[in-house]
Image: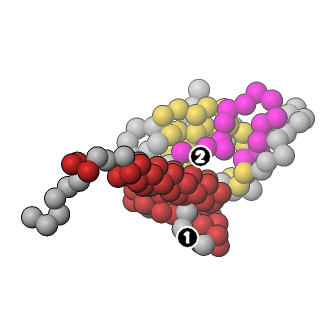
Amino acid sequence: MEQPDITEISIGPDKVLIAGDRVIIYAAQAMTEWTVREFRRPPIFFRDKKYYLIRKTPGPPPYAFIYELEPWPSEFEPESTRVITYDEFYVAERDGDLKTSRRHDLIHVALLPFYPLLGLCWSGFKERVLGPIGFEPAATTAGFSMRAVLVASVRLLGDRRSTVAAATREPGDWPITWV
């Protein structure tokens, strides 16, 4: 049997090998929505041809995964409602989402020590800025309110104890303040 010609192309940081009617993608980043399924397979369009995913394996460095695609057979009746088009735009969006996610993770870690004070921020800021980073706006407000009540309770109890202690002192127990 004769080996098919192998064509290699690059799409962003990914390497794509086309061997006959089979497509092998060495992806630099994981494509989480690409799963091997037996039923309701999502169609993957590449260069105006319809494929389906037959195998997903870990890739050698610097690639995260190897995805193997085969042409979509005519006997596949039901297909997923999700359609994937693998091209330069897909790869650019995937990499952009990954960069945004990493940046949000770093900002989340940097703001974590200030979590008790994030409840003081106005609601628009919490929804627009803190929400996408991973801080739930309602939880930051509730956490701040709970801490404020706790601090006020401790201060109130602390003041009450000192007042009671001062009222029950004997005259000889008074501290000497003039020395």
Instruction: Give residue 52's mark.
Output: none
Q: What kind of residue is marked 1?
A: Cys
In the orientation shown, which residue stands out farthest toward the front?
A: 171
Quadrant of the rendering where the N terminus is positioned:
top right
* Residue at left offset 45%, top offset 51%: 160
* Residue 25 picture quarter: top right
Residue 122 in percent (x, y) is at: 60, 72
Pick whichever, 73 or 122, lies toward us: 122
Are the residues at dot 2 and dot 1 in contact (C-beta closer than 8 Å)? no
Instruction: Please rate how many residues cluster around mark 1, counting C-alpha atoms within 10 Å: few if below 14, some from 14 to 19, many from 20.
Output: few
Q: Which residues are magenta?
A: 30-44
* Residue at left offset 26%, top offset 51%: 171
Pick whichever, 70 or 82, lies toward us: 82
Q: Which residue is mark 1?
A: 121
Q: Nearer the viewer, mark 2 or mark 1?
A: 1
Q: How far separated are the C-alphas under marks 2 and 1?
A: 36 Å
* Residue 129 picture quarter: bottom right
Q: Secondary structure at mark 2?
A: loop
Q: What kind of residue is marked 2?
A: Met
Chief SS of the magenta region: loop
